[in-house]
């Protein structure tokens, strides 16, 4: 049974019990967090750039219709075509129609979360067209028939020994006694397999980190160069992107690029930043003969005028995921959706409905690290609270949880009673904790005490200390 077929709680329990996943998740904390901090520290104006990037996106979203129309006009002027798609079905149909017109048998793909969102690979395969993921991480998860577990590191949930076993099982054309113990050997073997695929492809599909209204360009950032080969070698290049990827000018894109790589991988800049503008011109040496852009809405327009508008500032850097303690524990597949982590917990209910994704806004410790590191300053905890409130109002929240919230609300509306009950509870728990100050078992807290002791309260409650401090001041 796949993660998508199970509930979030089932997925989370399975993930916590997976020792291989725990080993792999350790590398997320080791690899991403420290690198981002160092990259930000090396750039004195990093915080100023975050403000500028946020303002660019806010301005664009306020005038999104105008910039999208300008972008379309520029694409057409440069010989390209734009396809407006309300939902995944329309986007899949548009892409398949382009592939059929090109007589495509093989399609190479650069990493694209929109491709995952519309599930384009399965659609192409059903039509007899072979899609080939060319990003190494995407190539590995495609080989395993899995979804990416991370926005920028699709195979981060796997350890090197697992990937080696997969390569040996799938790449039977190579000698059985070859060495695959080092990462460069794995990369070299994947490169050998993919090289001919690049040359054979009839169509190349890429995502877009940015769409530039000023020039009709699409911009992608990669560290492997596979995106360049995907859009230069085939006769047809298809860009798939959602509406909010547009920015007004190349200068605006450059500003946001300065915080993108630093937030994502801790690099000053990604190894490859590629700008594509329409099909090749008569004097161009290489490039596609045909250029298409498939623009997907899929609920984004509905977010523009509501409380979740700020999520449309997201540039898919993955910083919130990299710093999320919940993601560190359960990985990406436990979320059961395309987008994991804090960004997924906000975006998935918008795409699929809160009824189908009510568990995800609850999958947060509300530590605030996601908001603290987001280069676009998206207030993710605030948006998660909005979803929790909506789930409660629509009676999607489980009855037991609703009852608990109702009981808490009863006391919270009566401050004197709340202070008395919490003070009494603190004294009781302190007594039960004994000399060690720990509770091995506690009613209603079995999820915690099953794996660790619960610290007993020490001293007075915060409210009583605050009241005493206020009294001393007066």
Image (spheres, grey):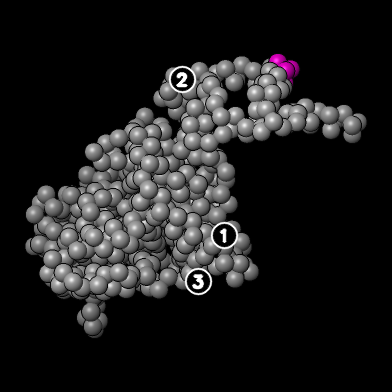
* Mark 1 vs mark 2, CA separation in Å: 41 Å
Kindly report which numbered mark, 3 or 2, lies closer to the viewer in this rendering.
Answer: 2
Range of residues picked out in magenta: 416-420
Residue 275 in sight here: no
Q: Which residue is mark 3?
A: 268
117 vs 81, nearest the viewer: 117
Helix, strand, or loop for circle 1?
helix
Q: Is residue 183 left or right of residue 379?
A: left
Which image quadrant is residue 128 in?
A: bottom left
Which of the image's four quarters has the N terminus?
top left
Residue appearing at x 59%, y 32% in the figure: 454
Dot 3: within a 10 Å radius of its alpha carbon, few (fewer than 14), some, or many (20 or more) residues? Answer: some
Which image quadrant is residue 317 in?
A: bottom left
Q: Earlier in the sequence, mark 1 or mark 3?
A: 1
Q: Which mark is residue 123?
A: none
Helix, strand, or loop for circle 2?
helix
- Residue 302: within the magenta? no
Q: Which residue is mark 1?
A: 50
Q: Is residue 111 left or right of residue 234?
A: right
Q: Position of residue 338 (x, y in %)?
A: 33, 47
Helix, strand, or loop for circle 3?
loop
Q: Position of residue 380 (x, y in %)?
A: 52, 44
160 vs 319, nearest the viewer: 160
* Mark 1 vs mark 3, CA separation in Å: 15 Å
Q: Is residue 50 left or right of residue 81?
A: right
Residue appearing at x 22%, y 59% in the figure: 166
Q: Which residue is mark 2?
A: 400
Q: Is residue 6 left or right of residue 214?
A: left
Q: Position of residue 121 (x, y in %)?
A: 20, 53
Q: Earlier in the sequence, mark 3 or mark 2?
A: 3
Is the C-beta separation of discs 1 and 3 under 8 Å? no
């Amino acid at each position: 049974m796949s993660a998508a077929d199970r509930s979030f709680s089932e997925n989370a329990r399975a993930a916590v019990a997976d020792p291989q996943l725990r080993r792999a998740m350790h590398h997320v904390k080791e690899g991403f967090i420290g690198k981002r901090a160092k990259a930000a520290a090396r750039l004195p104006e990093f915080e100023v750039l975050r403000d500028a990037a946020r303002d660019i996106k806010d301005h664009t979203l306020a005038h999104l219709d105008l910039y999208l129309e300008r972008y379309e006009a520029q694409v057409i002027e440069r010989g390209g075509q734009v396809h407006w798609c309300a939902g995944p079905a329309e986007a899949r149909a548009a892409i398949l129609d382009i592939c059929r017109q090109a007589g495509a048998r093989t399609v190479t793909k650069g990493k694209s979360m929109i491709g995952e969102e519309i599930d384009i690979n399965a659609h192409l395969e059903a039509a007899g067209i072979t899609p080939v993921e060319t990003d190494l991480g995407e190539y590995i998860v495609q080989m395993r028939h899995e979804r990416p577990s991370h926005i920028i590191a699709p195979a981060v949930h796997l350890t090197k020994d697992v990937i080696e076993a997969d390569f040996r099982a799938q790449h039977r054309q190579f000698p059985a006694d070859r060495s695959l113990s080092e990462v460069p050997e794995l990369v070299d073997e994947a490169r050998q397999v993919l090289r001919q695929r690049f040359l054979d492809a009839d169509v190349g599909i890429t995502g877009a980190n940015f769409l530039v209204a000023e020039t009709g360009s699409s911009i992608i950032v990669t560290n492997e160069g596979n995106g360049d080969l995907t859009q230069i070698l085939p006769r047809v290049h298809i860009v798939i992107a959602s509406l909010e990827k547009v920015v007004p000018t190349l200068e605006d894109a450059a500003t946001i690029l300065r915080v993108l790589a630093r937030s994502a991988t801790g690099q000053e800049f990604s190894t490859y930043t590629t700008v594509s503008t329409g099909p090749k011109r008569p004097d161009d040496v290489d490039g596609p003969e045909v250029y298409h852009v498939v623009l997907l809405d899929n609920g984004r327009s509905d977010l523009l005028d509501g409380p979740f508008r700020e999520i449309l500032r997201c540039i898919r850097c993955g910083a919130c995921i990299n710093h999320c303690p919940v993601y560190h524990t359960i990985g990406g597949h436990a979320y059961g959706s395309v987008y994991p982590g804090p960004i997924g917990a906000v975006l998935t209910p918008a795409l699929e409905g809160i009824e189908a994704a009510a568990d995800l806004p609850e999958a947060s410790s509300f530590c605030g690290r996601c908001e603290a590191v987001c280069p676009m300053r998206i207030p993710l905890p605030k948006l998660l609270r909005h979803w929790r409130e909506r789930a409660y109002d629509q009676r999607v929240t489980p009855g037991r949880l609703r009852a608990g919230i109702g009981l808490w609300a009863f006391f919270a509306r009566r401050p004197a009673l709340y202070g008395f009950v919490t003070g009494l509870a603190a004294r009781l728990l302190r007594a039960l904790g004994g000399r060690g100050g720990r509770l091995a078992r506690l009613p209603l807290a079995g999820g915690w005490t099953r794996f660790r002791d619960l610290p007993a309260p020490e001293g007075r409650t915060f409210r009583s200390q605050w009241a005493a401090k206020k009294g001393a001041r007066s």
